[in-house]
Image (cartoon, rainbow, N blue to C red):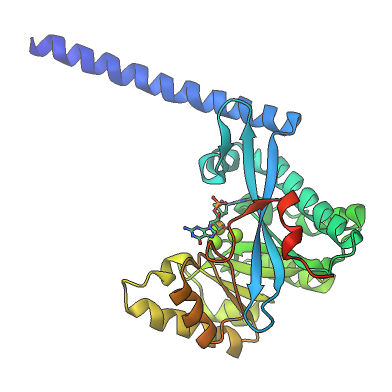
């Protein structure tokens, strides 16, 4: 009986490995197809200024509108896209689409606002990134002042010369750079003050009210950002209490379900001013 059981387990294990591998291959093939067939979409989440009460920016968030499975969240396919390198092509599409859409809104006569695009590590570390951004801005006609690139702490905090060069070249071009999910990684004060970064995005985990020390952390991040001449935005704001606290602490901007979830491009113009 024991022998039998072992054999079955072994077989089960074996087939689950190949099953996993098969699923990865399928997903990879499907991702390529999605890119070819235009199954990717951008949704946009508005970012509201505390001082003016106006929407001053939008974060572009990738969605895969799968013909059978419906909308698939980026956290489900970005890791594999990173691994296979497909993220470069997907990322190029995102950058182009976000710039094109933002320019289209400006052409319709709305007051210009910033569009933020999330960069993956592979994209940020490409030596051709700055030229690519330049080309996309030229191509779409969007002014660099209305494009923000979001990177994470782990992508930026390094003494590699080309990182500082990339950030300076982006700044010279006029493109804004923010640090996403701030506080969850390993930032160094040295690099934070050295690098031309325009904004910190406080990670939503610090808005959790159950942990009292989070309030102290949020206050510190806000004060530090301002001391270093950076703006600061809170992500994942869901409640009136969080909103009031951030406003009282002089946070510059907020985004979160409390104000609006990410929406398809057709549903954003109600937030714009003319
Ligand atoms: P992120 O850049 O930190 O984006 C914020 C995430 O929080 C989004 O999840 C957004 O829908 C969600 N969110 C917004 N407001 C709230 C709120 O009030 N409460 C809660 N619980 N969540 C909120 P989403 O769209 O699923 O994206 C997940 C992550 O996938 C993003 O995190 C970003 O790291 C990555 N991502 C999204 N689009 C792209 C892209 O075009 N390229 C790359 N490389 N990564 C992307
Ligand atoms: Mg982001
Ligand atoms: Mg992120
Ligand atoms: Mg974030």
Q: x, y percentage for residue 53?
A: 66, 78
The residue shown at (81%, 58%) is 102
Q: x, y percentage for residue 145?
A: 81, 70
Q: Report how many numbered discs are placed on residues in the image.
A: 0
Q: x, y percentage for residue 25?
A: 55, 24
Residue 80 visible: yes
Residue 125 visible: no
Kindly give the residue lying farthest to the left in the view shown.
Answer: 1
- Side of 159 where 177 appears, left or right: right
- Is residue 7 positioned above or below 136 on the image? above
Query: In this orientation, which residue lies closer to the viewer: 260 or 172?
Result: 260
- Is residue 240 positioned above or below 63 on the image? below
Quarter of the image for residue 215 reads: bottom left
Query: In this orientation, which residue lies closer to the viewer: 156 or 8?
Result: 8
Quarter of the image for residue 252 reads: bottom right
- Is residue 239 positioned above or below 226 on the image? above
Query: Where the C terminus falls, by quadrant?
Result: bottom right
- Side of 265 where 10 appears, left or right: left
Quarter of the image for residue 5 reads: top left
The residue shown at (8%, 9%) is 1
Kindly give the residue lying farthest to the bottom in the view shown.
Answer: 227
Q: Quadrant of ligand 4?
A: bottom right
Q: x, y percentage for residue 213?
A: 34, 79
- Side of 189 where 129 appears, left or right: right
Query: In this orientation, which residue lies closer to the viewer: 264 or 181?
Result: 264
């Amino acid at each position: 009986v024991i022998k039998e059981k072992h054999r079955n387990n072994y077989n089960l294990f074996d087939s689950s490995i190949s099953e996993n591998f098969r699923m990865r291959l399928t997903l990879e093939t499907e991702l390529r197809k999605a890119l070819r067939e235009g199954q990717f979409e951008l949704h946009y989440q508005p970012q509201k200024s505390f001082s003016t009460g106006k929407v001053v920016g939008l974060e572009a968030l990738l969605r895969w509108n799968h013909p059978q499975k419906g909308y698939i969240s980026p956290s489900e396919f970005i890791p594999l896209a990173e691994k296979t390198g497909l993220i470069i092509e997907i990322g190029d599409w995102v950058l182009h689409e976000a710039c094109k859409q933002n320019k289209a809104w400006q052409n319709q006569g709305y007051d210009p606002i910033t569009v933020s695009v999330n960069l993956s590590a592979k994209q940020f570390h490409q030596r051709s990134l700055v030229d690519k951004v330049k080309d996309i801005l030229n191509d779409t006609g969007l002014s660099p002042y209305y494009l923000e690139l979001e990177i994470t702490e782990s992508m930026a905090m390094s003494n590699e010369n080309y990182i500082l060069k990339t950030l300076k070249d982006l700044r010279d071009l006029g493109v804004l750079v923010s640090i996403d999910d701030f506080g969850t990684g390993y930032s160094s004060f040295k690099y934070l003050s050295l690098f031309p970064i325009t904004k910190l995005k406080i990670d939503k985990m610090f808005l959790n009210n159950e942990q009292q020390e989070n309030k102290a952390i949020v206050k510190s991040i806000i004060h530090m950002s301002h001391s270093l001449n950076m703006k600061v935005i809170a992500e994942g704001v869901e409640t009136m209490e969080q909103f009031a606290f951030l406003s009282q602490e002089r946070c510059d901007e907020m985004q979160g379900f409390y104000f609006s979830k990410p929406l398809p491009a057709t549903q954003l113009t109600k937030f714009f001013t003319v």
